[in-house]
Image (cartoon, rainbow, N blue to C red):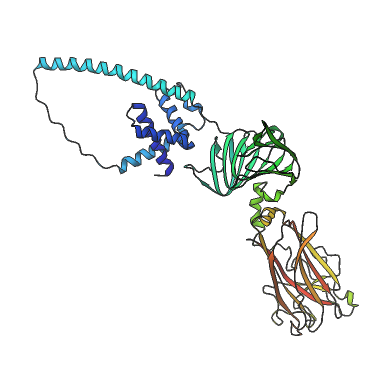
Amino acid sequence: MTDEDALLLKVARLLFFSIDGSITDEQFVELESLLQDNPVARDYYLDLLLVTVGLDEPEGILSLAEREGSFSENINLSLWQALAEQEVNAPAVASEKPTEKPTKPESVNKVKVAQRERTVSKFSIYTFVFSAVATLCIVAMVLFIPISSPIAVLTDVIGGEWANTNKIPRKGELLRPGALTLSAGFAELAFDSGAVVVIEAPAIFDLERDNVLFLRSGKLSAVVPKEAVGFTVQTVNADIVDYGTEFGVAVDDSGLVAAHVFKGKVKVSSVKQTDGVRESSWLTQDEAVSVDSEGVLSRKYVSHEREFVRKIETVKSWRSYLDVNLIQNPGFEKNAAGDYRPDLPIDQQITNVAIQDWVDDSVATVYTYNATPNEEFPRSGYDPVPDNCGRNFFVGVDDNEIYQDIDVSNLGYLIDGKGVSFTLSGWLGGYENHKDSLLVFAVFRNDRGEEIFRSSIGPVDPLERKNKTRFVFKTTSGDLPADTENIRIILRTKRGNGIADAYADNLEIRLSEK
């Protein structure tokens, strides 16, 4: 029997005891506690009340067929399964076979029958009265205890773990007013009003009513269309009211509230009053304010939207950035190799190739292993070359550089929050004792294209190559700096002798969550 089944069976028993008048003081306290503290138990209780009222008349006082999430949909199967399981597991009870009573004179039997008929008649009246009173009580409870309607839908969950609930919310489930605790992961809620909220764990929040959410702790971001203007996030120390915008709210363990506006406008008001007035502040795009436990608002400061997950699709995209090689055409295999013509002038000896996926405005090109004349270039099976070297490798030819940009803006939350590390690696080489060199840079830039950090591998000098035509594996690692939005990978060559016999192959940059 699942926890949900056990809870349903417990509520059903206590309800039936209450109806037939056999409930004890302890059971009454237990029922009252369940209904106060457990929203799932309340839903079960109200559904069972409706069933009890409507058992005799399918189209009676409250038609079960008209009520969304009715007993027939949500409880029927679970309750009977729970009852059946208890019946199977219950210990057997021995019963004694009744003994036959001696026959009495006919006159005595007639008297007994008459007495029994009068007794049954009196009992029927009592039963009718009790049933009527019980039914009226139940109807009164149903009418005066509000039955909450769903106000939102759990549209998506990623890595979600829930706590302090007997019923785990599932993707696509309708959500009624009540408290929820998201202990891990992310959850997206779509309110009936049109507002869409992304909750980040750990978070404790209450669905108050349509267009109102109470955030006790944790983080959320909200996208509010025009039809949902007025969407409100309440906290212990401040209320944040939307006026058609995108914004984020964070509440830490001390109760400090921070509101950040990404687009549009919101009003942040302290819950506490000073001289009968609530302190408030209007925020517009890129502005933020905090409210402390005393209800004091800070001065406005620049919002930092990367502290929030604004769309749950962003979380889904993380997998495509982490623990994979982000460089496109890293082994230069997408191009047909250029030709080597040693009889031509130096800058024309290798046919220039526009290298795919790279910005290539130079004479840098792509050449083939084991090409002729083979003594001029690396040969697989003879010279040390990269593992899985493929067919082609990069040749610098002259002083030049090529590059490609990698957009990592979707990782902004991870980079600035939990942290992201990188590993840059590649196979770099050259020709015999020539001093031609090649460097590979990873340049980390912000959303304005400004460089904030760089890392590099290379060059490989002739001594490191033992004055032979060969490749050497090079690698480096580090952490992405905060505010990184873009990584530019640059190959830069410098000529030393003849053409720039500086080579590169199987380049790689991998990112990992810390």
Residue located 15% across and 17% down the image: 112
Residue located 42% across and 44% down the image: 3
- Residue nearer the viewer, 263 or 386: 263
Image quadrant where residue 81 sits: top left
Q: Where is residue 45 in the image (x, y as percent from the top left)?
A: 44, 32
From the viewer's perspective, is residue 175 above or below residue 513? above
Image quadrant where residue 353 sits: bottom right
Q: Where is residue 397 in the image (x, y as percent from the top left)?
A: 84, 74
Residue located 55% across and 35% down the image: 177
- Residue nearer the viewer, 67 or 179: 179
From the viewer's perspective, is residue 346 above or below residue 142? below
Say whether residue 345 is left or right of residue 386: right
From the viewer's perspective, is residue 382 above or below residue 513? below
Image quadrant where residue 355 sits: bottom right
- Residue nearer the viewer, 233 or 498: 233
Say whether residue 123 is left or right of residue 302: left
- Can residue 357 be seen? no
Quadrant occupied by the C terminus: bottom right
- Can residue 354 be seen? yes
Residue located 69% across and 66% down the image: 478
Q: Position of residue 501 (x, y in %)?
A: 81, 77
